[in-house]
Structure formats: structure tokens, C-alpha cells
């Protein structure tokens, strides 16, 4: 049986198009399977044919301010927004036809929120563009249909997951409502709710028509002078190097000529890696086949809400029919996507897709009565963490990326294009976008391709799974192991992977601190797919699953508590070798560090670590770092800088950009792998460390001071520093000496009741004392005035961002950081709503359990007009978690040791006895 693709059930881009793709159709009669029939359908790809207000540009310009590559939803939005900034100096290049890549076959769903604020804001910007701005600018409909979404769940756990995201969305201004099962049919009479536990309704969601939507962008862009070219393939991008070897974009070479430009935005979607390869930029994304099917007409389905059935399938109205699809653990990887693949589809694999058919029939039984009208299976690009790749390349200046949208390019595209345009023009996006920034990825993997494949697959496979905060991925592991990895493993470490590095999260030990098992991370088994054997008796994964809960997990809550309270009562040793480490050297090193940091390093003597901020021009916090002056054998100064592992690429890029912009003669050397840091923290830290050092007394070190020493015959730098609010010391040494230094420190550990501790304890302790976590409590979207860090910002000199900070000091604030303590029987994770006097005033940026305080503690920005500390303290507060509100108390700073006496070595005997008693009762 041959079937023609009809305009009533596929996106409008298919109307009157001929000649380029194959659709596999399958009829069902009450879902008795019929034979597959392939129908070759002609497709004339001239999307602009019936748009008289739009004409393609003819002559390729010899130069442009910006060249956008790829005319899909993201590329069209980017060109539209850039045209309002650069006018006629914007060029959009498409190798085939507009939307011919993956945009044309999109499912066209727009949800109002995601799990992060910035992705949520981009989707809200898309909604505003398609529903309001574009229709106003063009005088025509832009392809929007408001339907709302019902997110259904089948278990209490999945409902908590959905509610957690919905509550955060509400804090971001999104309208959401929890529904009980019996309330759902009032909104969607055709839904089966017999197995539904609960649901969330988001009335602002809807569907998008890709052709109409993209053409609306181009019509307006052309009015502003932008030039649009089809059938114009980019064959090369040329670069040039400055005196310091930094590369920048110079030309875009096409099959129709060369365009001189210093800014390129790569919006080529699944083909973006090919563009990156032209200049040696690796774009971490892979392409999988993603499918949906369209049913025959279903009475009563028109204008019903979209359905997102948690853990299984999405279902959206398509006129009188339904469109449904999902994500699976055995999806087909597209290993080599043809460069000339346009308006193309694949045969649908029903053995894979049938799980979605069953799920869709269960949720809307009427589907079984009408059968399938058509199928669509096309390529979609996916990343390792489900976030898009955006921003300027680290390797090549002027090369911007907007790709890897994980099948969400339509819903994110409007906002993403706006942010990319702002990034190109202003040097930064409007939104924070840390979690989408191309610089977020770790580097220096043992096997990059293995990491990419495993992580992308796991992200695809678990896309609709319950997302627990303390779950650990199984793919892409063991790529970066520290020198002490085997020692940590033998001590019972449960490893987590942060910034690509295997790090102990906590230690699984018995009451005597002895490891209960060796929790090895095994080779990724692809969840038993593609011929891989699923691991049996996987001890590591079984331990991880114990933490996959929205309650306090009994075992790990106790173990982490023991590590935290041991730190408060005796001492613990953290392996902090994962931290980013750099050396800034060269003739202009002092000038560069003076411009980079918010504190003047020239005021401090040699041998002093200084905590400072790196700011951008708008005063946003690019990172917080610890810096000290060092000297080479000739006495020439350089600077040793350490920062969070999550800021690894951001710090490097920020320094390189300033050096490039101000033509400074400096070198930035990365010592992250070459140097190790062991951090001994707690009241007994000096007692344990002092016997190993015979050249000076640790008592002589003031906070921030460091001296060179020898530990077990190995050279180390011993610094008095703490990130947990205790008397503590860091030992910096060559990585090849780490094991010797570690064993020397720990040889008398039992005598002093000292133990190793993982990053879960580090996070808890630092949150309890009120220290910042970049990019959570501080980030590019926050400034030091709001974050209560003005003491770190010099007022008498110029540095990057200082002018803006000077202005901000004199202006009324609209938000300010506050601390909240919450006594609940459930954990807080961050993203919970802050209610003040029955009004939403923000959300928790970070939260953890504070074992010394015996309660949850969190930090978040309170948003009020002309906010002050007095206003913060006067309010009546509640924290909303998953729909439940809990009384909370607001503080200006953490109530635990607010004067930081413990860091000076001053301890209260009464308090220490209380903490010791708490430890003994864990």
C-alpha cells in the first residue's frame, strides 16, 4: 500500500514540497501490524515560494560583520536578532534550503520551562517571540497555537520529580498547577487516568509550525538589511594568529565566494561538528535517530493539551490527529551524517518504537481505534548533559557556536538566537548560561570519543527518567583519575564524576572507619543494549541507587555526617587536586593580574594567598579564585591561581580574552594535572601536620600565608587556608609526589582521629559556614554588591568591572543574598521557592544539610524593591519544596560561627563537646 504525505498532519513545511525525502508509512487496524510500505514522495524545497514579502539575496557580499551558518530555527533567530544590531552587515548562509536540516521535521512542541533558570528563560523568550513579537512585526501569524501541557506521572517518585521542576518554574514566573488524577479529564477528556498518580498542568505551552516561524524571522531580518543565501555551502573558514599564537576568524569561504569577517556563528545543527573541524574546534555532540508518528483522525482531539507522560512518551495534537514519540535506551546512532543530507528521513525501526506506541495507547486509548497515518524518523543532535552548546570557542576568537539542542532547537531557538546575538555584539549573553556555555566541558580525557559516545547515549536513554540530585552517571567514567585514585578506592570511596574527574563523594565504611567494599566503576554497558551484557551484581551502582531518593538516604546521610562532624571535632583530609591551577607569567603579568582581579595583588607580600574575584565588564562574577605571587629563578614575578574545577575553562578563557583584548605580553600555563592539593581541615590539623615540618612553626602562619617546606622528603607549599570554616592547611606539591605526601600525613591519622572525606562533606561544610559556590550562589548573573562581597573589591583603582561596581554601590538593590535555615524531615537541594509574607521573592540557589546546626541550610537571592538587610530580616518566610511549604528563618549570614573564630583556631569547649556528642550519635 502506498501512502501520500498529506498537509493535514505533518508540519506546514511539507505542504506543496516535492522531491527530497522518503517517508515510511504504516497502517494499523486496531494496531494489528501490517507490512511496511515505503513511499517516495516528491518534495519541492522552496519554503519562500509563497512568501512574496521575502526574496533570497543574490550577490554574495565580500565582507560582513557577522556570518551565520545554518538556516534552521536557531540560525534564523540568530540572524533576526543580529540584524537589529548590525543591519545590512549580517549574512545567513544555508547549504541547501531554509529549514532543510532537522528543523523541518521537528515535532514542534514548546514547553514553558526546563530544569534550569536560563533554559527556562530562553523558552519563555521563544514563546514571546512567536506569540507576540513576530506577529506584531510581520502582521501575520508566526505559527503559534497555545494548548497547554499536562505532565502525567504514574508513581509518587516521578510526581515528586515533576513537582520539583514545576515549583522551580513557578519561581521563574511560569504558571503551573498540580493536578490530582480525577481532575485531569476536566482538561483532557480522552486521557486514561487509571494508572496516574498525579500531574502538573502548564497552561502557557503550545505548538509551533517550523516553516511559518522561521520565515517570520527572515522577513523581519531582511527588513533590517540582513542577506540570506540558500544553496551556499561553507567549504572552509580561515584564521590568523596574533603574536601570542591566539587564533581568530578571518574569512568564510563558500562555494560561491569568500566573505571577509571576524565573527561567525555556527548554527549548523547536526552538521555543526563539520564546521568546527574546519578550524580545529571540537564540538561535543552526536547525532541519533529520533522518531514520531502521526495517527489518523481522532474525534474530539483538536485543541486538547499536549501530554508529557513522565518516563515514556510525549503526545501533541496535530489538527484532528495526534503526534507522539519518545526516547529509548537502544536508539540508533548516526555515525556518519552525510553533509548533503537535506529534507531527509530514515526508515523507522518499529522494534524500537513500539514501546512508545504502547505507552501512547495506554495514555490515550482512542489511538488504538484509528491507527497510524505516517511516520517521521530523522536525525537530531544530542550532547553529554542534555544542554545545548553555546558561546564563543576557547580555541578561536570570533567563532561562536549554537548547536546541540537535544531535539529542542525549536523551543529553545528563539531565546538562544537572542542570547547568541547579544553574545556576539556585547561579548556576553543577557542570561547567565553557564550550564549551556561551550566552556563548561572538562578537557584532558584519556579517550574523548569514548566519553562522548557513552555520555551522549546515557543522556538520550535517561531523558525522561526521574532525575535525582545525587545519582551518578555510569557512562564516560574513569577518563580522569587522580594520583590517589587507588588509595581512595581501597578506603571505600564512592566516586562521583565532577568536571570529568573521578573524585570521592563519600566513603562507605563501617563504624570503625574501615572500607566495607571496593566500589569500582565498571565499563559502561549501555544498559544492556547494542549487544552489551548488562552488569550483574554491580556494587557501585547498587550503592548509588541507595541515594536515588527524595528523602534522606539513611546510610549516606550518616556517613557524610560522620565526615562532617569529624572535620568539626578533629580533622579530615580532602584530596583537592582536581581544582583548576594556572600560572600567569610574562613581562606584563603584573599588569594583567591587576586588571583581572578585584583585589590589588601588588599590595600583598610574597608568600600570601589572596581570595579575589574575576569580574566581567558588567560586574558579573566570572569566578572566585585564590592567587599568590611566585617568582622564577631570576626573581621575575608570576602568579599562581587556583579555582573551582567547574570553572576550569571559564578562568582560562577569561584570562586569555583580557590578554587578547589589551594586547598584553603574558602566558597562561595550565598546571591542573601537574600540581596536587591536599587539604587538611579541622581543630587537630596542626597537631597532625606539624611533626612533618621542622623548618617553621605552623602557628607562625597567619590566614593566607604560605611557606615552602619538605614533607617526607618532598617539596611542598604549606598554606593556611580553609574552605570549610576550620583551622586548616593546604599542601601543594608536584603530582608525582602526591602519594608520598598523602601517606605521610595519614600515617598518624588514627592517633588524632583523622579520616579522609569526600566532596559531599566538603559541600555541606562550606555551605554551613556560608562560603560561596560558583556558579551557584555567585555567577556571571550576580555582582559582588548583591552577593555581599564588596569587601573583596578595591575602590581606589581600576580593574575589569570596577566602574560598574562603583555605580552599583551607589544604587538601590533589587536583590540580595540571604541565608535560610529550615528544620524539615526532608532534604533541600536548591531551586526551592522562597516565600516572604505570602509572596514569591526568589528561590534557593544552593542548599544542603548542616550537620553542626542539625538542620537544612540554603542561600538564595531575595528580590524586593530597594532591598535592605532590615527588610530581609523583617519578613515571614516559608520554603516551598515539591508543593509543600516549610517555616524557615532568614539570616544575613550563616548562623554557624558568623565571626569565623574557628578558622583562627579559637574553639569553644562547650560547642566542641556538643559536636562530639552529635558525632557519636550518628
Image (cartoon, grey):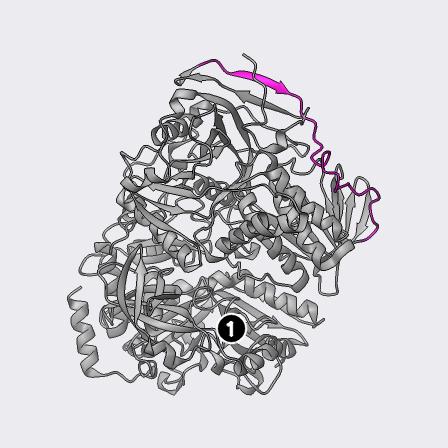
The front one of 749 and 170 is: 170
Task: Say if 492 sits above or below 865 in the image.
Answer: above
| Foreground of the two, 184 or 422 | 184
Asked whether 43 falls inside the magenta stretch, the response is yes
Residue 722 horizontal/vertical position (percent) = 38, 75
883 sits left or right of 147 in the view? left
**Image quadrant in which you'd find residue 776:** bottom left
Instruction: Please provide percent x and percent y for residue 523.
Output: 40, 41
Q: Which residue is drawn at 39% across and 80% down?
A: 869
Residue 39 located left or right of residue 43: left
Residue sitting at x 35%, y 72%: 819
Residue 729 in the image, given as x and y percentages of width and height: 38, 76
Q: In which quarter of the image is residue 757?
A: bottom left
Secondary structure, mark 1, is loop
Q: Counting other residues with Cα less than 10 Å from the Cα at mark 1, is it few (<14), some (14-19), or many (20 or more)?
A: many
| Residue nearer the viewer, 183 or 584 | 183
> Is residue 553 or residue 231 the one in the foreground?
231
Question: Which span is picked out in magenta?
Answer: 34-63
Where is the C terminus found, in terms of image quarters? bottom left
Residue 120 locus on image (x, y percent): 48, 53
Residue at screen point 40% across, 18% down = 31
Residue occupied by mark 1: 783
Quarter of the picture containing the N terminus is top right
Give the prevailing secondary structure in the magenta stretch. loop
| 507 in magenta | no
Q: Is residue 633 visible?
A: no
Q: Horizontal placement of 130 versus 578: left or right?
A: right
Amino acid at each position: 500500500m502506498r501512502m501520500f504525505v498529506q498537509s493535514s498532519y505533518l508540519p506546514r513545511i511539507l505542504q506543496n514540497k516535492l522531491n527530497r525525502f522518503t517517508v515510511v508509512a504504516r497502517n494499523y487496524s486496531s494496531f494489528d501490524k501490517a507490512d511496511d510500505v515505503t513511499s517516495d514522495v516528491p518534495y519541492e524545497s522552496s519554503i519562500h515560494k509563497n512568501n512574496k514579502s521575502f526574496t533570497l539575496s543574490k550577490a554574495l557580499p565580500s565582507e560582513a560583520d557577522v556570518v551565520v551558518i545554518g538556516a534552521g530555527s536557531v540560525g534564523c533567530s540568530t540572524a533576526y536578532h543580529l540584524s537589529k544590531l548590525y543591519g545590512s552587515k549580517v549574512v545567513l548562509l544555508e547549504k541547501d534550503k531554509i529549514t532543510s536540516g532537522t528543523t523541518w521535521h521537528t515535532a514542534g512542541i514548546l514547553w514553558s520551562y526546563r530544569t534550569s533558570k536560563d533554559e527556562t528563560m530562553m523558552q519563555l523568550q521563544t514563546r514571546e517571540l512567536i506569540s507576540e513579537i513576530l506577529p506584531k512585526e510581520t502582521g501575520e501569524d508566526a505559527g503559534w497555537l497555545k494548548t497547554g501541557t499536562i505532565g502525567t506521572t504514574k508513581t509518587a517518585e516521578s510526581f515528586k520529580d515533576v513537582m520539583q521542576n514545576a515549583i522551580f518554574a513557578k519561581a521563574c514566573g511560569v504558571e503551573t498547577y498540580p493536578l490530582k488524577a480525577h481532575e485531569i479529564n476536566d482538561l483532557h477528556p480522552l486521557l486514561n487516568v487509571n494508572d496516574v498518580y498525579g500531574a502538573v498542568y502548564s497552561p502557557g505551552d503550545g505548538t509551533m509550525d517550523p516553516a511559518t516561524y522561521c520565515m517570520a524571522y527572515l522577513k523581519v531580518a531582511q527588513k533590517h538589511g540582513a542577506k540570506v543565501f540558500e544553496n551556499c555551502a561553507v567549504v572552509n573558514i580561515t584564521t590568523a594568529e596574533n603574536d601570542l599564537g591566539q587564533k581568530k576568524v578571518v574569512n568564510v569561504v563558500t562555494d560561491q565566494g569568500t566573505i571577509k569577517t571576524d565573527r561567525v556563528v555556527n548554527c549548523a545543527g547536526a552538521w555543526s561538528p563539520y564546521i568546527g573541524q574546519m578550524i580545529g574546534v571540537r564540538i561535543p555532540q552526536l547525532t541519533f535517530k529520533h522518531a514520531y508518528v502521526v495517527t489518523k483522525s481522532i474525534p474530539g482531539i483538536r485543541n486538547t493539551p499536549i501530554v508529557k507522560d513522565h518516563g515514556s512518551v510525549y503526545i501533541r495534537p496535530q489538527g484532528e490527529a495526534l503526534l507522539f514519540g519518545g526516547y529509548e535506551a537502544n536508539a540508533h546512532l548516526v555515525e556518519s551524517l552525510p553533509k548533503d543530507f537535506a529534507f531527509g528521513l530514515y526508515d523507522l525501526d518499529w522494534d524500537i518504537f513500539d514501546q512508545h506506541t504502547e505507552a501512547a495507547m495506554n495514555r490515550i486509548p482512542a489511538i488504538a481505534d484509528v491507527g497510524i497515518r505516517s511516520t517521521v524518523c530523522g536525525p537530531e543532535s544530542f550532547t553529554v548533559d542534555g544542554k545545548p552548546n553555546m558561546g564563543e570557542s576557547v580555541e578561536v576568537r570570533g567563532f561562536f557556536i549554537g548547536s546541540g539542542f537535544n531535539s529542542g532547537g525549536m523551543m529553545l531557538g528563539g531565546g538562544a538566537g537572542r542570547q547568541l546575538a547579544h553574545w556576539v555584539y556585547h561579548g556576553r549573553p543577557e542570561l547567565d548560561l553557564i550550564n549551556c556555555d561551550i566552556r563548561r566541558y572538562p578537557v584532558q580525557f584519556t579517550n574523548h570519543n569514548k566519553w562522548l559516545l557513552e555520555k551522549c547515549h546515557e543522556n538520550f536513554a535517561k531523558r525522561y527518567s526521574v532525575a535525582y540530585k545525587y545519582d551518578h552517571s555510569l557512562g564516560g567514567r574513569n577518563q580522569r583519575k587522580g594520583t590517589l585514585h587507588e588509595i581512595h578506592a581501597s578506603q571505600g570511596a564512592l566516586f562521583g564524576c565532577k568536571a570529568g574527574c573521578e573524585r570521592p563523594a563519600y566513603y562507605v565504611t563501617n563504624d570503625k572507619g574501615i572500607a566495607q567494599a571496593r566500589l569500582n566503576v565498571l565499563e559502561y554497558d549501555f544498559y544492556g543494549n547494542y549487544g552489551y551484557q548488562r552488569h550483574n551484581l554491580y556494587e557501585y551502582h547498587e550503592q548509588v541507587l541507595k541515594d536515588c531518593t527524595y528523602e534522606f538516604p539513611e546510610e549516606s546521610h550518616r556517613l557524610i555526617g560522620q565526615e562532617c562532624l569529624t572535620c568539626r571535632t578533629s580533622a579530615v583530609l580532602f584530596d583537592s587536586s582536581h581544582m583548576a591551577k594556572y600560572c600567569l607569567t610574562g613581562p606584563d603579568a603584573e599588569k594583567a593580574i591587576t586588571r583581572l582581579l578585584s583585589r590589588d595583588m601588588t599590595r600583598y607580600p610574597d608568600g600570601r594567598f589572596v581570595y579575589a574575584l574575576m569580574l566581567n565588564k558588567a560586574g558579573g562574577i566570572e569566578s572566585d579564585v585564590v592567587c599568590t605571587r611566585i617568582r622564577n629563578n631570576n626573581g621575575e614575578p608570576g602568579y599562581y591561581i587556583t579555582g573551582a574545577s567547574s570553572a576550569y575553562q571559564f578562568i582560562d578563557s577569561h584570562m586569555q580574552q583580557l590578554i587578547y583584548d589589551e594586547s598584553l605580553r603574558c602566558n597562561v600555563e595550565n598546571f591542573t594535572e601537574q600540581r596536587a592539593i591536599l587539604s587538611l581541615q579541622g581543630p587537630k590539623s596542626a597537631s597532625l601536620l606539624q611533626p612533618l615540618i621542622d623548618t617553621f612553626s605552623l602557628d607562625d602562619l597567619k590566614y593566607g600565608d604560605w611557606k615552602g617546606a619538605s614533607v617526607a622528603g618532598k617539596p611542598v607549599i604549606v598554606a593556611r587556608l580553609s574552605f570549610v570554616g576550620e583551622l586548616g592547611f593546604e599542601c601543594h606539591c608536584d603530582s608525582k609526589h602526591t602519594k608520598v605526601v598523602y601517606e605521610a600525613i595519614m600515617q598518624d591519622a588514627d592517633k588524632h582521629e583523622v579520616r579522609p572525606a569526600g566532596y559531599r562533606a566538603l559541600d555541606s561544610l562550606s555551605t554551613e559556614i556560608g562560603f560561596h559556590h560558583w556558579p551557584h550562589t555567585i555567577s556571571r548573573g550576580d555582582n559582588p554588591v548583591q552577593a555581599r562581597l564588596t569587601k573583596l573589591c578595591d575602590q581606589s583603582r581600576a580593574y575589569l568591572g570596577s566602574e560598574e561596581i562603583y555605580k552599583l554601590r551607589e544604587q538601590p538593590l533589587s536583590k540580595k543574598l540571604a541565608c535560610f535555615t529550615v528544620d524539615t524531615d526532608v532534604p533541600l537541594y536548591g531551586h526551592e521557592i522562597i516565600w516572604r509574607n505570602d509572596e514569591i521573592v526568589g528561590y534557593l540557589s544552593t542548599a544542603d544539610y548542616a550537620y553542626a546546626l542539625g538542620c537544612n541550610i540554603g542561600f538564595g537571592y531575595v528580590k524586593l524593591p530597594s532591598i535592605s538587610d532590615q527588610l530581609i530580616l523583617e519578613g515571614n518566610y516559608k520554603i516551598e519544596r515539591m508543593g509543600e511549604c516549610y517555616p524557615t528563618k532568614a539570616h544575613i549570614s550563616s548562623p554557624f560561627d558568623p565571626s569565623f573564630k574557628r578558622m583562627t583556631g579559637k574553639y569553644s569547649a562547650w560547642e566542641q563537646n556538643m559536636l562530639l556528642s552529635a558525632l557519636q550519635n550518628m
